[in-house]
Amino acid sequence: MIRHVVLFTWTPEATEEQKQALHAELAKMPPAIEAIRAYRYGPDVGINPANCDYAVAADFDDAAGYVTYRDHPAHRAMVERYVSPIVASRAAIQFEI
């Protein structure tokens, strides 16, 4: 099984409306992309200073499932429309679980 984790930091100009719109769009990914086995996402809860602002964690059966998600038109459109306009930095990793 492959776990994909991505961490985002938002631009200072990112609005609450943009952040909420992204959160709502992420809920559409599992029904749209059959390869997703588990999908969790949300804002940092503020326990530690200097954390990233938001995280997404997704599980797939294998690397091919992750690539299907990565390249899926619904995912690509969501990133372009909702993530790219507000992201200042992004870090990601895929690892076996």
Image (tube, grey):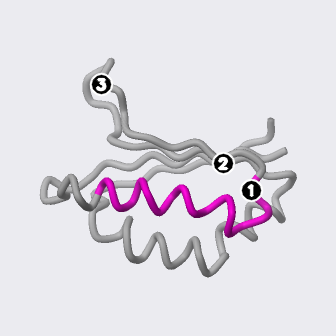
The image shows residue 9 at horizontal and vertical percentages of 31, 48
> Of the residues under marks 1 and 2, which one precedes in the sequence?
1
Local crowd at mark 3 within 10 Å, few (<14), some, or many (≥20)?
few
Q: Amino acid at mark 3?
A: Gly
Mark 1 is surrounded, within 10 Å at the Cα level, by few (under 14), some (14 to 19) or many (20 or more) other residues, namely some
Compared to residue 15, the image places residue 79 above or below, namely below
The quadrant of the image that shows the C terminus is: top right
Residue at the disc numbered 3: 46
Q: Amino acid at mark 1?
A: Ile
Residue shown at 65% from the left, 68% from the top: 70
Amino acid type indicated by mark 2: Ala
Residue 17 is left or right of residue 2, and the answer is left
Q: Main secondary structure of the magenta part?
A: helix
Report, in whole angstroms, how far the alpha carbon at label 1 lies from the one at label 3.
28 Å
Rendered position, 95 above or below 33: above
- Residue 32 is a magenta residue: yes
Quarter of the picture containing the N terminus is: top right
- Residue drawn at (83%, 65%) of the image: 64
Marks 3 and 2, how far apart in space? 22 Å
For label 1, the SS is strand
Counting residues from the start of the chain, the first of labels 3 and 2 encountered is 3
Q: Residue at x 33, y 41 (%)?
A: 53
What residue is rendered at 61% in x and 81% in y? 73
- Residue 44 at x, y percent in the picture: 36, 33
Residue corresponding to mark 2: 58
Q: Are marks 1 and 2 in contact (CB under 8 Å)?
A: yes
Please give the range of residues in magenta. Answer: 19-36
Farthest residue in the top direction? 47
Residues tagged 1 and 3 counted as in contact (Cβ below 8 A): no
Of helix, strand and loop, which one carries label 3?
Answer: loop
Which residue corresponds to mark 1? Answer: 36
